[in-house]
């Protein structure tokens, strides 16, 4: 295949010297030679102008290597130039091409990179205005126009509509000598962007402002349409409005301007399109004038950035991530690089004094961002002042700008010639590398929140020529303040979470008490949300008569208040359990306590978060291994699940009382008999409040996990949690699983006694004989004294019937005496000559503990003694 030339000269225009009416329909513009080349160097598009220029049909070129269109004797150099163009956003240069008939054409090409929708992601768009083969003279002016005049080009002095007029000649013939030069100077040096497009909408003049904005020379743009100079929809819209001007539509306006290739539209520009008319009033060309609404545009961009920062900074509870979000939003829209250093030990206090002395400080580089993927500001990792890698330690000297700004508590601007910055560079190699990288403007902004100085943010510019100004400093301070507040909140929440976790775990049982009625396993999982730890708790409380109380509760709210309320309620439950209150009465007293707590906290800040525990739920159960009966009551709490030895799972039908703190509503006790080896599962509602399944599915999973046989209760707990949870829970979870034991008849002995003082001796005899049968002769002396005192008191102060019962556990012997009187004995100190009053004092000294347990009718006085060697 022959090689193809590409850039012809402009097609001559017909002369329009004679005056006439204004043109209403513009002539069809001559086609531009354009081609598209993909990243592999293959031609993918071929325009009609390209066909006219080089003679090849699209079917002969598309799909072929573009290098075949180069002239043979310049192929190597031109191919290298095109390869160089492929790596840029835009490229221009002169390339020797070969016409289909063999002629050599040397043309200037203008290439833009664009993105395609197909699998090829990079295209090279090449445009050229048709011209003449190499070696031929360019076409002369249209008939009737003098050399140097006409629609295109720089007209000679005194001629043409748009040229540089000589003194006293041309359209402005009355101008004095030098007026033409002033007009040209005004056009060339205007602060606005000025350009003139002819009737074919091709550029014929461009001033220095246009050249600077588009980074192209006038020669590179001349003869090309605006969409060919800047391929972008804004250019297409502008050209459509220019055509409207040519058609007599009058001046047109746009609220945007075309930017350099690869940057698209510039919203900060206002563009006007006005017709240029000859003396006869005929539209001959269009003048494009654009000016930048700089301050308005910058203010709008700052406010948009500030608004965006509200959504992008502080998205997680991670201080390092927040610092990086600050750096990411600042670069490149505010600065060319940014670095965030957090102090190793935040400083606390009020507003710093402007005259506060600066001192050296240590910090950790936490976040870095630069417009450069690699370069001095991106790779430098000095001790300070650079955008070094995150995680490095930084040490700022006492007289450095950073230390001074932190001491004074406000940000500051510095340029490269500032004495403070230069002194810092002499002290610190990292700062020297910063200035040596071309950074010409620096902002230092302290990170402060709620009276604490957390760190410092550094911002610099080395790519953008304009320095930072006061409004930039204000914006940087606002962005930094948002990040500082988020970091301070994160650290505070982290400290509070740690404190709450410590408090919560310290208030929960550290070890389970020794008792023989139940095998027990427990689990506690704190919530995985930012709300923090809640007030869920469980407890195991040994009671008299070998009985055990199980408690599970859930305090509303999260945080330290909820944990503290939980601790108070747990203590209250233990105190009430020691009085041996039935479950319903215990919850009633607990309900009164929550009401009092709510009244006490009613005037404190944040009381609405905890309300003294109002809404707290609780389940209280008492299991008796002798009778194998379990008594339960609940206050707004989920019912417990029971698993019988045969594997059947059911909820215990415990009446649902109201949550604690409402007052005035009754609680009911539910009793049931549990076979030995039954399983009880008590839990808080966080176990059932899963996000990925409904309540019925959650209950099915829990029942299935409880029904599966397991060697240990720890295995049961793990199975339940594994089945119910697929993620960290949104609420705290407390789980208590217990397997029942039974004290059989060989461990319990009971005797009914008549209300006769003579029966005391018989009671002592029954006790010693039973101890001998159990092999507990060593405990006989204390047991005889205890039995004698308790039976004597029941006969003397109580009412029949009277019953003596001995309960033998592994390490405890309990002596109980029941009578039908509700009068409870009280220990007192007997005076010297008193004949009585020393019995209970003696029992209290000899027994490990003693007390009174009331029933619906009568009472039981009991005393425990330890059987262990200690």
Image (cartoon, rainbow, N blue to C red):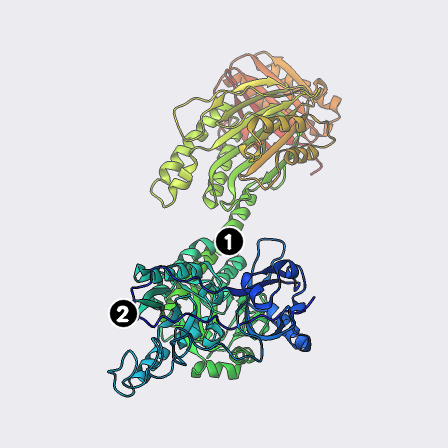
Question: Which dot marks residue 354?
Answer: none
Secondary structure under tag 1 reads helix
Please provide percent x and percent y for residue 277.
30, 69
Give the residue furthest to the left. 174
Q: CA distance from mark 1 to mark 2?
A: 83 Å
- Circle 1 is placed at which residue position? 495
Query: What residue sits 46% from the left and 33% below the top?
Result: 616
- Judge left or right: residue 782 versus residue 266: right
- Judge left or right: residue 517 versus residue 733: right
How crowded pointer 2 is (Cα within 10 Å; few <14, some 14-19, many 20+) is rated as: few
Q: Marks 2 and 1: in contact by CB < 8 Å? A: no
The N terminus - image quarter: bottom right
- Circle 2 is placed at which residue position? 280
The C terminus - image quarter: top right
Give the residue furthest to the bottom. 177
Q: Nearer the viewer, residue 795 or 819?
A: 819
Image quarter for residue 39?
bottom right
Please provide percent x and percent y for residue 863.
59, 27
Residue 382 lies, with reference to residue 510, above or below; the image says below
Q: Can the viewer see residue 383?
A: no
Query: What residue sits 42% from the left and 73% below the top?
Result: 204
Residue 839 lies, with reference to residue 266, above or below; the image says above
Query: What residue sits 50% from the left and 78% below the top?
Result: 138
- Judge left or right: residue 505 versus residue 457: right
Secondary structure under tag 2 reads loop
Q: Can the viewer see residue 759?
A: yes
Q: Nearer the viewer, residue 292 or 563?
A: 292
Q: Exactly how many numbered labels are in the figure?
A: 2
């Amino acid at each position: 295949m022959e090689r193809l030339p590409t850039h012809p000269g402009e097609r001559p225009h017909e002369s329009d010297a004679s005056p006439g009416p204004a043109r209403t329909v513009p002539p069809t513009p001559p086609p531009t030679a354009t081609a598209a080349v993909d990243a592999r160097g293959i031609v993918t598009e071929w325009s009609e102008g390209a066909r006219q220029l080089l003679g090849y049909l699209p079917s002969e070129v598309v799909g072929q290597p573009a290098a075949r269109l180069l002239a043979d004797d310049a192929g190597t150099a031109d191919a290298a130039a095109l390869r160089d163009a492929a790596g840029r956003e835009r490229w221009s240069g002169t390339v020797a091409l070969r016409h289909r008939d063999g002629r050599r054409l040397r043309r200037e090409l203008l290439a833009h990179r664009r993105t395609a929708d197909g699998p090829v992601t990079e295209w090279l768009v090449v445009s050229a205005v048709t011209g003449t083969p190499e070696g031929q003279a360019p076409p002369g002016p249209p008939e009737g126009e003098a050399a140097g005049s006409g629609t295109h080009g720089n007209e000679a002095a005194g001629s043409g509509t748009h040229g540089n007029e000589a003194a006293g000649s041309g359209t402005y013939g009355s101008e004095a000598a030098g007026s033409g030069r002033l007009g040209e100077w005004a056009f060339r040096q205007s602060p606005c962007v000025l350009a003139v497009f002819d009737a074919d909408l091709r550029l014929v003049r461009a001033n220095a402002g246009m050249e600077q904005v588009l980074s192209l020379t006038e020669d590179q743009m001349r003869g090309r349409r605006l969409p060919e100079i800047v391929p972008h929809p804004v250019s297409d819209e502008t050209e459509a409005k220019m055509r409207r001007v040519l058609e007599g539509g009058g001046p047109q306006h746009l609220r945007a301007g075309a930017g350099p290739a690869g940057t698209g539209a510039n919203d900060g520009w206002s563009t006007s399109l006005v017709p240029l008319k000859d003396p006869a009033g005929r539209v001959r060309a269009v003048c494009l004038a654009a000016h930048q609404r700089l301050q308005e545009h910058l203010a709008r961009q700052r406010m948009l950035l500030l608004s965006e920062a509200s959504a992008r900074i502080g998205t997680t509870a991670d201080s390092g991530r927040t610092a990086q979000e600050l750096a990411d939003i600042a670069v490149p829209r505010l600065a060319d690089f940014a670095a965030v250093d957090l102090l190793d030990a935040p400083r606390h206090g009020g507003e710093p004094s402007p005259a506060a002395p600066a001192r050296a400080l240590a910090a950790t580089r936490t976040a870095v961002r630069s417009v450069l993927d690699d370069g001095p500001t991106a790779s430098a990792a000095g001790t300070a002042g650079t955008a070094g890698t995150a995680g490095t330690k930084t040490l700022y000297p006492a007289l450095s700008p950073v230390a001074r700004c932190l001491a004074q508590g406000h940000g500051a601007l510095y340029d490269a010639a500032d004495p403070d910055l230069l002194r810092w560079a002499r002290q610190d190699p990292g700062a020297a590398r910063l200035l040596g990288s071309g950074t010409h403007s620096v902002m230092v902004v302290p990170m402060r929140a709620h009276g604490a100085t957390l760190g410092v943010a550094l911002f610099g510019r080395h790519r953008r020529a304009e320095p930072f100004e006061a409004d930039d400093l204000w914006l940087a301070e606002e962005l930094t303040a948002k990040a500082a507040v988020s970091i301070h909140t994160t650290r505070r929440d982290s400290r509070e979470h740690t404190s709450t976790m410590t408090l919560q775990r310290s208030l929960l049982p550290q070890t389970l008490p020794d008792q023989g009625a139940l095998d027990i396993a427990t689990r506690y999982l704190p919530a995985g949300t930012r709300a923090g730890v809640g007030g869920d708790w469980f407890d195991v409380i040994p009671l008299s008569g070998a009985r055990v109380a199980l408690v599970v509760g859930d305090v509303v709210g999260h945080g330290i208040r909820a944990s503290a309320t939980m601790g108070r309620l747990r203590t209250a439950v233990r105190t009430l359990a020691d009085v041996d209150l039935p479950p319903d009465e215990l919850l009633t007293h607990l309900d009164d306590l929550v009401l009092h707590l709510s009244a006490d906290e009613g005037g404190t800040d944040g009381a609405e978060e905890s309300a003294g525990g109002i809404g707290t739920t609780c389940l209280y159960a008492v299991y008796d291994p002798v009778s194998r009966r379990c008594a339960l009551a609940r206050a707004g709490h989920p019912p417990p699940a029971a698993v019988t030895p045969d594997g059947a799972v059911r909820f215990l039908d415990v009446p649902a009382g109201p949550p604690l703190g409402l007052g005035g509503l009754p609680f009911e006790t539910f009793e049931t008999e549990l076979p030995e080896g039954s399983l009880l599962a008590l839990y808080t509602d966080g176990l059932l409040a899963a996000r990925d399944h409904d309540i019925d599915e959650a209950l099915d999973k829990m029942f299935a996990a409880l029904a599966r046989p397991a060697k240990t209760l720890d295995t049961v707990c793990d199975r339940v949690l594994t089945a119910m949870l697929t993620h960290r829970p949104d609420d705290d979870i407390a789980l208590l699983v217990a397997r029942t034991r039974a004290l059989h008849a060989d461990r319990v002995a009971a005797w009914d006694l008549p209300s006769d003082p003579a029966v005391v001796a018989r009671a002592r005899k029954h006790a010693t004989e039973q101890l001998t049968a159990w092999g507990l002769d060593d405990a006989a002396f204390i047991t005889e004294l205890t039995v004698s005192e308790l039976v004597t008191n029941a006969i003397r102060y109580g009412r029949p019937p009277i019953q003596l019962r001995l309960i033998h556990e592994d390490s405890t012997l309990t002596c109980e005496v029941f009578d039908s009187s509700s009068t409870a004995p009280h220990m007192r100190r007997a005076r010297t000559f008193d004949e009585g009053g020393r019995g209970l004092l003696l029992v209290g000294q000899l027994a490990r503990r003693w007390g009174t347990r009331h029933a619906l009718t009568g009472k039981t006085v009991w005393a425990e003694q330890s059987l262990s060697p200690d």
